[in-house]
Image (spheres, rainbow, N blue to C red):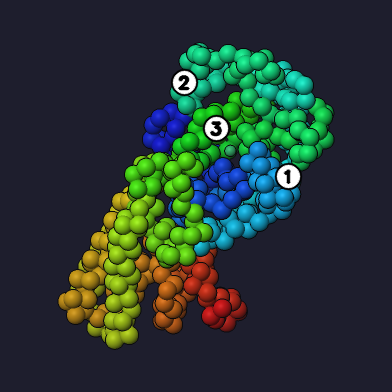
């Protein structure tokens, strides 16, 4: 079966068909780096990292781009109140972001483009929109002429006339129409600025994603993703800018993850209930935080509370205990066999169920329930005093493989030498069968366990890093 995913654009689950065989081009809107990220920002990082890992698991070569908004009003205000400059603040919180999301098991994107480093292409993008008549300059600002893009509203499923209700031009407004949005903002005195054909200023927020997605992934991409709150106006505006410029479809699939509530309340500045990742990962195992997030389908809302996190921790530990028990039995394992094939078949059947769950719009909640079935099966195997090395190794390998797909690691304890040897054997077999995807995946799994492989003419050697 092929991977199915829910496309916000069509409001349907669709079969994923890549632009180019075996490849996925994916763009995920990243954070504005003026503070530490809160738990709401961590959700898209974890969700789309898992989507990426799953595509890789299924043999796709994924190019993953996620931006940093490193100049905007919030950064300028933060700089003013702290008496620092904008780039210093951006650098600090980009580093903090990497620390936080790496702790949560997220891999780095292939490219993390920054606005400041892409000013030329952003200005060029805006200039072309002006030339084509989709945008206009007004007293040093540049605005997108929203009504000039016929399909405006197609992502958020609203007609432009609905949007016009109540819209009127405020006095002092530089827009020709209230629906127009800023592509470029003239600098106010004392603000950071870049020179442009329209005078000194900086880009509006939406344009950066259109310009950087085009630069790093091309005119049309497979998947564009972000939080549900970005659907309108951010993603709607990105579509208008990009499709007006290129005349091509910007993204074939749009994915949006649900909100996070804190103790059943919306997270908001005024309620003072912001939970920073920086703080929770000091109190809780970051793996448990990731596990908690993945235990809910990405499109559903999540309620975050200390109690729910604690119950996730208990659940996570049940899986760990099962894995640990297998490892203990591994030490006392034998070559005796007892219904081995039957057990091996059951393990394979569970892997197939896991794949089926993930193929169905990345249903991690269901995939995690399969992990519990695997643990149950393993517990039962051990309870029956079975000791076949072949079966125990298959259980251990399955745990490692499925945890890895979800970005979870079992590295709390060291891998046994025999387990490493078994994985290397599996990798060599995969290479012989020219299944390089699986081979690379095993290498990555080992790398995460701090095992370094060295391929020599005499065979593969390994050492602990
Ligand atoms: Zn964006």
Disc 2 to disc 1, how far (Cα)? Answer: 33 Å
Looking at marks 2 and 1 on the same chain, the residue that comes earlier in the sequence is marked by 1
- Towards the viewer: 185 or 446: 185
Instruction: Indicate if the residue with disc 3 has its beta carbon within 8 Å of ligand 1.
Output: yes
Looking at marks 2 and 3 on the same chain, the residue that comes earlier in the sequence is marked by 2
Determine whether the residue tagged by mark 2 lies in a helix, strand or loop. loop
Q: In the displayed structure, does residue 121 sit left or right of residue 290?
A: right
Image quarter of the N terminus? top left
- Nearest to viewer (mark 3 / mark 1): 1
Residue 66 picture location, percent across and down: 59, 47
Disc 2 to disc 3, how far (Cα)? Answer: 13 Å
Determine which quarter of the picture holds residue 151. top right
Q: In the displayed structure, does residue 49 sit left or right of residue 183?
A: left
**Is residue 426 something that shows in the picture?**
yes
Disc 3 to disc 1, how far (Cα)? Answer: 21 Å
Residue 279 picture location, percent across and down: 49, 60
Label of residue 54 in the image = none
Determine which quarter of the picture holds residue 127. top right
Residue depicted at x 72% and y 51%: 84
Label of residue 158 in the image = 2
Residue 269 picture location, percent across and down: 49, 42
Label of residue 116 in the image = 1
Looking at marks 3 and 1 on the same chain, the residue that comes earlier in the sequence is marked by 1
Determine whether the residue tagged by mark 1 lies in a helix, strand or loop. helix
Determine which quarter of the picture holds residue 395. bottom left
Image quarter of the C terminus? bottom right
Q: Residues within 10 Å of mark 1 (few under 14, many from 20)?
A: some
- Towards the viewer: 235 or 270: 270
Tag 3 residue: 235
């Amino acid at each position: 079966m092929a991977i199915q995913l829910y496309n916000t654009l069509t409001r349907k689950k669709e079969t994923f068909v890549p632009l180019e065989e075996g490849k996925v081009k994916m763009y995920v809107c990243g954070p504005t780096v003026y503070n530490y990220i809160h738990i709401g920002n961590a959700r898209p990082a974890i969700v789309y990292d898992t989507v990426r890992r799953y595509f890789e698991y299924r043999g796709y070569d994924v190019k993953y781009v996620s931006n940093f908004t490193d100049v905007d009003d919030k950064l300028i205000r933060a700089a003013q109140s702290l008496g620092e400059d904008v780039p210093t603040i951006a650098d600090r919180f980009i580093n903090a972001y990497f620390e936080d999301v790496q702790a949560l098991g997220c891999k780095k994107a292939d490219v993390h483009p920054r606005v400041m480093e892409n000013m030329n292409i952003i200005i060029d993008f805006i200039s072309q929109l002006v030339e084509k008549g989709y945008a206009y300059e007004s007293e040093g600002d540049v605005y997108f002429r929203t009504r000039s893009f016929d399909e405006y509203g197609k992502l958020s499923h609203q007609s432009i006339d609905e949007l016009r209700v109540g819209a009127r031009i405020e006095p002092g407004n530089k827009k020709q129409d209230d629906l127009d949005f800023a592509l470029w903002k003239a600098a106010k005195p004392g603000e950071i600025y870049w020179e442009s054909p329209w005078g000194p200023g900086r880009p509006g927020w939406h344009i950066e994603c259109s310009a950087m997605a085009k630069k790093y992934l091309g005119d049309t991409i497979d998947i564009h993703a972000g939080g549900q709150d970005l659907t309108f106006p951010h993603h709607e505006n990105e579509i208008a800018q990009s499709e007006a410029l290129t005349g091509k479809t910007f993204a074939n699939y749009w994915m949006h993850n649900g909100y996070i509530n804190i103790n059943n309340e919306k997270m908001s500045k005024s309620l003072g209930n912001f939970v920073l990742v920086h703080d929770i990962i000091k109190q809780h195992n970051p793996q448990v935080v990731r596990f908690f997030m993945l235990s809910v389908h990405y499109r559903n809302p999540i309620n975050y509370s200390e109690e729910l996190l604690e119950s996730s921790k208990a659940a996570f530990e049940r899986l760990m205990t099962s894995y640990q028990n297998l490892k203990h039995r591994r030490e006392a394992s034998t070559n005796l066999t007892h219904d081995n094939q039957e057990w091996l078949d059951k393990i394979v059947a569970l892997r197939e169920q896991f794949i089926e769950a993930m193929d169905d719009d990345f249903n991690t909640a269901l995939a995690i329930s399969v992990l519990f079935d695997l643990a149950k099966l393993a517990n039962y195997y051990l309870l029956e005093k079975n000791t076949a090395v072949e079966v125990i190794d298959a259980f251990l390998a399955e745990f490692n493989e499925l945890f890895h797909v979800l970005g979870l690691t079992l590295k709390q304890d060291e891998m046994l030498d025999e387990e490493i040897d078994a994985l290397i054997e599996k990798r060599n077999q995969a290479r012989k069968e020219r299944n390089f995807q699986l081979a690379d995946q095993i290498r990555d799994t080992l790398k995460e366990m701090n095992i370094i492989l060295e391929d020599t003419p005499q065979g593969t050697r390994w050492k602990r890093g």
